[in-house]
Amino acid sequence: MSFPELSILERALTALPQHYPGPGGVAGVVRDGRVILRHSWGYADLGARRPMTAETRIPICSITKHLTCAVLLDAVGEPAKLDRALDAYLPLLEGKRPTAAHLCHNQSGLRDYWALTVLQGATHDGVFRREDARPLLSSARSTHFEPGTRYSYSNGNFRILADLIEERTGRSMAELYQRSVFGPADMQTAALTADTSLPPDGIVGYEGNETAGYFEAANRIYWAGDAGISASLDDMLAWECFIDRTRGDEGGLYRRLSAPQAYADGRPASYGFGLAHEKIGDVAISGHGGALRGFRSRRLYAPTERLSVVVMFNHEADAYAAATTVMKAALGHSDAEPAVGTWDAGGTESHLDPETGLALVTRPIGKSRVSLSFATAAESLVAGPDGSAHSAAVSLRVDGASLHMDRPRENLTVNAARISGTAKPDIAGRYHAAELDAHLDIVSTNGVFYGGFDGSLGTGAMHAMRPLAEDVWLLRCKRSMDAPAPGDWTVLISRDAEGKVKGLTIGCWLARRIDYAKIG
């Protein structure tokens, strides 16, 4: 295809600081195996007045995941070689067990362990040591779904893979990344910087925004496999050049990483080996984003166009949208205006999905848009002429008292029943989750309810609870150890034959259906 004038692309790149404001950032473009643009702005540390440069190493967060899978393919071979060790890693798991390939493709059904840290009493600025991970991951007794049938994002999948790779090879992930990825790709300064309390090159991540101001993000987490790599813009552009350089090699790492994957029912999966797959127009794109408190990143690669885009921020603006904007400019792509209709479902409504145990809350935004709360953050959808609403990842349709939701990327179809009624104010007490060996205290403060967790990681803060319907509550969690936070937890109250509270089930998109028994 013919590419737009470089000046158009340059304008898109240099406009990023205005459209995605924050302390600092970097962005670059590779075309035909050559770096054609690189741009840096702002500060790596506002207080020290340390400027951001193309050589400043920044945590790439979850972009690490596909590099972990690259190490697996290069140093171990087929994921199945780790299956027996995975069985030993998950000794308590009941039912069908996931394979190492399921972990690579986020099809394991294992709950995300960063969401579980909330239930274990962690505070958002707490310490998570290397030795804290395996006991938490190995305690799993159940999964969201039968492995291989759905997609659910789980950082723990890749943390487990890193542990298994180290056990299999007898080498550290730091050494393996260097041998399999950094060295071959000439990523000269990239490194595994697993302890986020020791950021490289004096980089500081920032929470906040232009309205509230920016403040330093606290990170005291040890990462390995799911995140942990830090790299400069120049390092990341070198990786993109390496991808182009090896594009014709059938055994090349990126070609193997980006091979098509499927679910157990044969439907194509849009995620595999730590890479997400999507389209911009008719152009296939692979890549991944990253989010750690105070940092956001995204890389995108269009193989047919030999085109890559990398964007990294040391703040929490939308790096995915920023990278997509630059990629569209590079492709000369303009989104067609969708045919707009009216969302006729009325005001705010609540539904409950019986499979996931999660609430779906819809709220109209004007006449033609609707906000859906189901995953970690609210999603905005546009109503079409037929009354349904759509975004890139989800579609909604009201059918009488039911809400029909399709999430093709997750292989998930939901028919959720409308819920109503008044929540009863008799839920205060202490609850215990046997699977986690953790507790939840629900407290009424003059009729206003809060919930607080305690477990192996300490005693957490109290979280506001909001009644949603009869025996259905939402527990709000807007900050946690990892970013993004779990969001709203759905709390389903269970009662005995006499109507007394006997327990509850709690879940969020990242960690579903955890049962608690009332003990006091």
Image: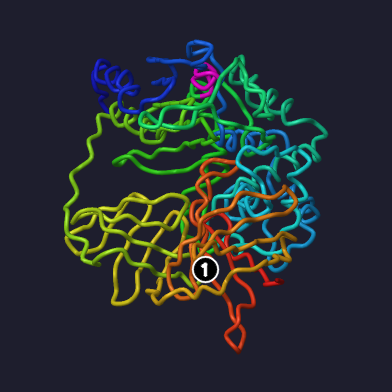
42 to 60, vertically: above or below:
above
What sort of colour scheme is used for the picture?
rainbow
Which amino acid is tagged 1? Gly
Q: Nearer the viewer, residue 488 or 174?
A: 488
Residue 468 placement, left or right of 157: left
- The kind of secondary structure element at disc 1 is loop
226 to 194, vertically: above or below:
below
Q: Position of residue 453 (x, y in %)?
A: 65, 56
Residue 244 placement, left or right of 20: right
Q: Nearer the viewer, residue 352 or 214?
A: 214
What is the quadrant of residue 1 in the picture?
A: top left
Tell me if residue 430 can be seen: yes
What is the chief secondary structure element of the magenta stretch? helix
269 to 259, vertically: above or below:
below
Q: Nearer the viewer, residue 449 or 13?
A: 449
Q: Which residue is mark 1?
A: 357
Q: Which residues are magenta?
A: 232-239
> What residue sits 19% from the left and 49% below the top?
338
Tell me if residue 186 can be seen: no
